[in-house]
Image (tube, rainbow, N blue to C red):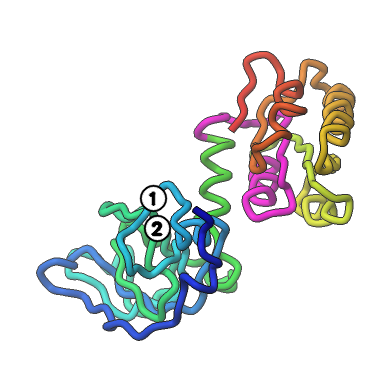
Amino acid sequence: PTPSPIRDVLRIDHVPTPTIDSTHDRNNVLISAHYAGIQYPDFLQAQGLYQIKPPLPYTPGMDVVGLVVDKGSDVSDDRIRIGDRVYANTALCPSGGGGLGALAEMISVSSDAVFPVPDELHMSSVANLGRNYCAAYHSLKVIGNVGPGDLVLVDGASGGVGMASVELAKAMGAKVIAGVSRVDKGTLPSMAGADRVLCYGRDRETHKQFKEEVKAAAKEMGHPDGVSLIVDVIHGDLFQDALVSCIKPLGKIC
């Protein structure tokens, strides 16, 4: 069946304001939300197309940034104080649920999912950490073990996870080839630090050209056998048409 348009499955509603229950929420933090992140998985989940399907109705959203207004008795002042600026990734809550509840004015979450926001950062700048940087870090470090001297290829490099992957790979000391679907999308990954930006287009001919350009770039950058790791955000035909031929022997595709 065709999924319903996103505008037909979401609505603004009034729900009871969460509180900290002294018995059941001793490890929870109550956050007054200032910013919340929205990413593609939130749309998929709302349409019933995501791998995690919460019971209806539910409040979507994984990333939230705001001020702590209350906390449970087990949350020490050494870690979190009332009034602190914090970021929460609801997907890290021990109860699971796939990352829900962030698109609300107030949210109660486990302190295990709450992190302080440094004073020098504007809260809006960390509102999409979970969907973007956590996914990128998992691919690059947990799976890929990327480090200095590696060469990383990132497709979909102008999007959230793509740009996060470029930034983190560079911070880890790797060189980065960024792939984009259109030439005009190349500015953002360049600003994020990509060493090369190449266009893979949208058909098999441009995919083939992209494959040859990646191989040539990898050779010029000291990796004649291919790239060390590919962060494949796009999937689809590009994987078979180009990516599998760009990776070095025993390299990894995430």
Closest to the observer, 28 or 121: 28
Closest to the observer, 191 or 43: 43
Amino acid at circle 1: Ile
Residue at x 32% of width, y 80% of height: 69
Residue 31: name its quadrant.
bottom left
Q: Name the residue under label 1.
A: 52
Q: Position of residue 132 (x, y in %)?
A: 57, 53
Q: In this view, does 70 lie above or below 47?
A: below
Amino acid at circle 2: Gly
Q: Mark 2 points at which residue?
A: 99
Q: Which mark is residue 158?
A: none
Closest to the observer, 61 or 76: 61
Residue 29: name its quadrant.
bottom left
Residue 26: name its quadrant.
bottom left
Closest to the observer, 226 or 237: 237
Question: Secondary structure beneath disc 2?
Answer: loop
Q: Give the range drawn in magenta.
A: 142-171
Question: Secondary structure beneath disc 1?
Answer: loop
Mark 1 Cα-neighbour bin, 10 Å: few <14, some 14–19, many ≥20 = few
In magenta stretch: residue 243: no
In the picture as drawn, the residue positioned furthest to the left comes out as 23
Residue at x 84% of width, y 51% of height: 186
Q: Is residue 231 above or below residue 30?
A: above
Residue at x 63% of width, y 31% of height: 147
Q: Is residue 214 above or below residue 126?
A: above
Estimate the spatial distance between the alpha carbons at disc 1 and disc 2, rounded to whole Å: 9 Å
> First in sequence: mark 1 or mark 2?
1
Residues at circles 1 and 2 in contact by the CB criterion of under 8 Å = yes
